Amino acid sequence: MGELRLMKGNEVIAEAAIRVGVDGYFGYPITPQSEVLETLMARQPWEETGMVVLQAESEVAAINMVYGGASCGKKVMTSSSSPGMSLKMEGVTYLAGAELPCLLVNVVRGGPGLGTIQPAQSDYFQAVKGGGHGDYKLIVLAPNSVQEMHDFVGLGFDLSFKYLNPAMILTDGMIGQMMEKVELADFKPRWTEEEIVKMSGSWATTGKTADRDRNISTSLELQSEKQEVFNHKLQAKYESIQENEVRYEKFMCDDAEYLFVAYGSSSRICQKAVEIAREKGIKVGLLRPITLFPFPNKQINEMADQVKGILSVEMSAGQMVEDVKLAVNCRVPVEHYGRFGGMIPSPDEIVEALEQKIIGG
Amino acid sequence: MAKIKGAITVDTEGCKGCGLCVVACPTNVIGLAREVNGKGYNYAYMEQADKCIGCSSCGLVCPDSVITVYKVKMNA
Amino acid sequence: MDVKDIIKPENIAYKKTDVLTDNIMHYCPGCTHGVIHKTIAEVIEEMDIQDKTIGVSPVGCSVLAYNYLDIDWQQAAHGRAPALATAAKRLMPEKYVFTYQGDGDLASIGTAEIMHACNRGENIVVFFVNNAIYGMTGGQMAPTTLVGQKTSTSPYGRDVELNGHPLRITELIAQLPGTSYVTRQSAETPGAVRKLKKAVRKAFENTAQRKGTSFVEIVGTCASGWKLSPVKSNEWMKENMFPYYPLGVMKDE
């Protein structure tokens, strides 16, 4: 068993980054995620593993540092919260367009605009549907515990290098600020230059040696015919991710007549709501998407064979519910229940919404 | 006294006929051809070959790196 | 002696460096980018650092610089090249990393990135090509466009009331303690190209010695944007650009 510690979600992102051998972190302070940068600066991992940590002049600079580092075949990451993530979207679409691996962490707060510093899940569309311009997708992981915040740093990099695509941990201020017991991974050494050349030599800009053509990290292709072919290649990659990387969790679904679909913080509250509802005799289960892209369409569709109605519970005005509806394809009623602007729903509210919108609806 | 003789060759298909080499040449060796290359540019050529001293001025200012300069020392 | 006796491999005094590719540059006739590309390529060849050099290209005419210098390249979003270079150099400290940026890229949209990279003293080289106009998008006003200069977005000439003053950003950069070498050069004559080459070499050598940021501005022409011939453009540059953007070394520590 690995080392056990009581840690904040944001702190564990930093700790996990050091332990999985991240080469570079580039960040900018913003509430409620500043502990990621603070923890790294206090830990001084450059003394320990050689990891580079830099406070950039802006979120825009930070994401472009990620672009520069990722282009070198390095394991690089950034974290931010909603308004900062909006600023990063330019860089994110370039990273996706240049097919570069990296990890992004969005500790979501309520919006729009400067909004609030309290937790929300209202950046689902930005994370899952694009956010930046062009047809691209991010691999989006939604942790619902401090342990998963830790685990998804490693998983995010694994998937991101497997598919040469940016990955994002989409979490929120609640999980970022929450303290829980976490089992930490053992330290993995950072990749050596030889390992990087062996693994990513066909694209990483490590210096053009005589044995290969020059590597160019770019998202530019002025010939539309070629750009279309490239877009087809991207779409095929996204299909392959959809085919192979769906992750989800079911809670009390075996005999369920109704279903909650919820991710991240909302899924924890929904677990309690399931218990309360079952005490009242309502047989409800919970399906928790762990990957938001790829979305568990098939698994939700299968549940529509079994249940009479589905409630999508999100801390937003209704974003993921659109994907749940697409997955269900009108076979059973699908409704949304949400608190937003930094408000968090109580389990009782959720059960009441189930009774009113689905059972009584 | 050693006399220096030079000559240039121009990759005429790569030349865009900008004329910067013509101005840079201290001995007025280079002119632009009346004929055009495949892209329609009046390319540079050695108009007065005997005057070339192989100083490389044309090569240095050429934006398209189409000029190669040759130089020999001759003992008179 | 006959010309064909002179034109022999053993008599070559000057030829295109192998660090340049065989691609014909997309630049307009007479464009200064070509001369600057070549000069950087020659220095890379002379220092034998082709396998250790990473270029970061901008958005603008020189976005496609990666087609011409046979080294590894990263193509940055508009203005962000110094951020990419920061990460590349910090993650690969033994490499030579340079950015290549135009006036719109560096002195307008990328002002924050260049200021902070220079202020942190990143051990990178910055090549800043100032031709006082946006070339790629068709000749719009740049932050460095001169007062009274006509462009497609200042069709009656740059008006200070409307557009503010031409930005001497290199003078600002020279104030930053993070920079060790700041110079303004040009490339219109053989002598100027030779001086430029010395500056380029010094800049690369400085970064190897971890002296901080080396910043080389090159005042150049844009014949198409200025609507002049290449030769006339050089004359216009000398007459109008050099008085406002005086050449020379501003800092060498």
Image (tube, coloured by chain):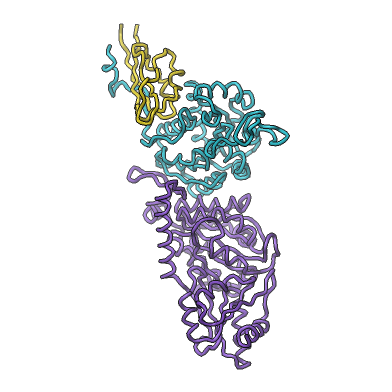
Chain colours: A purple, B yellow, C cyan
Could you tell me which quadrant the C terminus of chain C lies in? top right
| Place of residue A331 in the rendered image (x, y in percent of width and height, measured from the top left) | 51, 81
Q: Is residue C191 left or right of residue B35?
A: right
| Place of residue A126 in the rendered image (x, y in percent of width and height, measured from the top left) | 57, 63
Front residue of C32/A167: it is: C32
Asked if residue A343 can be seen in this view, the reply is: yes
Q: Quadrant of residue A281?
A: bottom right
Front residue of C138/A131: it is: C138
| Place of residue A325 in the rendered image (x, y in percent of width and height, measured from the top left) | 54, 75
Name above or below for residue B19 compared with residue A311. Answer: above
Report the residue at 41% width, 30% height from top.
B64
Count of numbered marks: 0
**Residue occupying the far right of the picture:** C161
| Place of residue A337 in the rendered image (x, y in percent of width and height, measured from the top left) | 63, 77
Report the residue at 60% width, 24% height from top.
C242
Name above or below for residue B40 compared with residue C92. Answer: above
Asked if residue A14 can be seen in this view, the reply is: no
Could you tell me which quadrant the N terminus of chain C lies in? top left
Q: Is residue C88 left or right of residue C20?
A: right
Q: Is residue C136 left or right of residue C44?
A: right
Name above or below for residue A192 compared with residue C220. Answer: below
Q: Quadrant of residue A320?
A: bottom right
